[in-house]
Amino acid sequence: MLAALLITTALAAPATLTDRKALERPVFVEKTADKAVVLAQASLAADPNAAGHEPTFLEQYLTYQLSPVPLAQVKDGLVMSHVIGYLLYGCAGGLWGPVVSVNGAEFSGDVALTWFLSGLIWFGIATIATGTGIGALLFLVVPYLTTTATLNAIDRQMKAKGLKPPPSKDKPPEPGTTTPPPDTPPPSYAY
């Protein structure tokens, strides 16, 4: 009852009115040597799982979200990893879910250590927070958090090996060319 009241209050609370112009960042455009246009803002976001980046303790064990630029294999196995992580939580589902679901993932000491320490730390935080009343809710999120930490460890492992996402089957059209319209229009559902 209290949780429903808090959610309703949070959703019904008026948002803070701020000047939209103050929040917007200007878009910077860079031209590279091959005349491709790249947004400079894309380079501002540091990848915590980049091959040359040494993750901090918080980035490695206490992460609560997937890397902003994960490999396609990790992104594809995200949902199944979390499902297995929840269903088999007592049987190391947060470790085996990502290892099984991510194409090309390897079971290694770093991945297992990340899963173990992340689970231990988040379980300890949830246990301590039980005295405040939110610990019981936090126990529901521990499988998600440990699975996410494991997915980030696998992403770091794959990027360190130099693995690239598989090539897409649909290649983008070359600049200056247009794709011809299909021979038959798609079916209409307006009938």
Image (tube, rainbow, N blue to C red):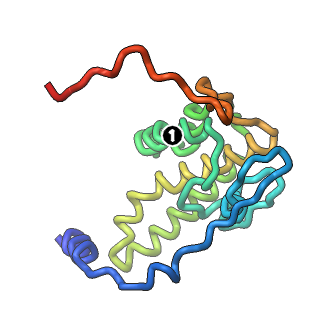
Q: Say if 83 sits above or below 146 in the image.
A: above
Direction from residue 112 to residue 3 in the image, left or right: left
Residue 147's x, y, as percent? 54, 49
Nearest the camera: 107 or 19? 19
The C terminus - image quarter: top left
Residue 46 in sight here: no
Residue farthest along the left direction in this orientation: 191
Direction from residue 132 to residue 162 in the image, left or right: right
Direction from residue 33 to residue 83 in the image, left or right: left
Nearest the camera: 58 or 114? 58
Looking at the rendered structure, the kind of residue marked 1 is Ser
Residue 138's x, y, as percent? 41, 65
Q: Say if 17 sits above or below 48 in the image.
A: below
Q: Mark 1 points at which residue?
A: 81
Residue at (27, 81) in percent of width and height: 14
Residue at (28, 21) in percent of width and height: 187
Q: What element carries label 1?
A: helix
Circle 1 Cα neighbour tier, 10 Å, few/some/many (<14 / 14–19 / ≥20): many
Q: Say if 26 sits above or below 160 in the image.
A: below
Residue at (47, 52) in percent of width and height: 143
The N terminus - image quarter: bottom left
